[in-house]
Image: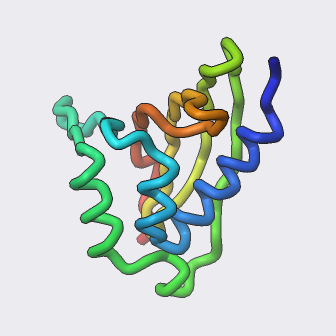
Amino acid sequence: MHDFQAIEALMDEYFRILHEGDVEATRAMFLPDCGLFCPQPDGSLTHIAMPDYLKVIAARTAPKDAGYPRYGRVVSIDQSSERTAFVKVECAVQPRYFVDYLTLVKVDSRWRIAAKVYFVSKTEA
């Protein structure tokens, strides 16, 4: 049942697309209806739908283009069935660093991100 190598490979690709700002690879990695959620310091919750997230990626300067090093680390993988998993990662779109909680599903023999909850863990000055 354990698909850790495939999930780790997906996360390596996730870190690459964050670093390079690869919109098409992001589109392929996430389910079309994926929601992204970020709790804010004031208690509010930011929700971004996938089409809006893709626009954000397209509009920002990729960390690679800004001269930042690639950063990403898998903290944990919890695979609960042959087609569901939960991954916690630390990553960056510099100057911001994040902790992401990613819910994965296996669709058509391929792991994809179904939901993302994240928060900004620090911002470089």
- Look at the image and tell me in which quarter the C terminus lies: bottom left
For the residue pair 12 and 28, the one nearer the viewer reads as: 28
Taking the view exactly as shown, the residue that stands out farthest to the top is 80
Q: Position of residue 121 (x, y in %)?
A: 47, 47
Relative to 8, say whether 72 is above or below: below
How many numbered marks, from 0 up?
0
Q: Position of residue 73 (x, y in %)?
A: 69, 49
Specify whether 117 is left or right of 29. left
Kindly identify the residue that appears in the image at 63 percent across and 21 percent down. Answer: 83
Kindly identify the residue that appears in the image at 38 percent across and 80 percent down. Answer: 61
- Look at the image and tell me in which quarter the N terminus lies: top right
Specify whether 41 is left or right of 24. left
Residue 80 occupies quadrant: top right
* Image color mode: rainbow
For the residue pair 43 and 125, the one nearer the viewer reads as: 43
Residue 106 occupies quadrant: top right
Specify whether 49 is left or right of 87. left
Residue 57 occupies quadrant: bottom left
Q: Position of residue 99 (x, y in %)?
A: 52, 42
Relative to 3, say whether 47 is above or below: below
Q: Position of residue 58 (x, y in %)?
A: 32, 72
Kindly identify the residue that appears in the image at 25 percent across and 38 percent down. Answer: 41
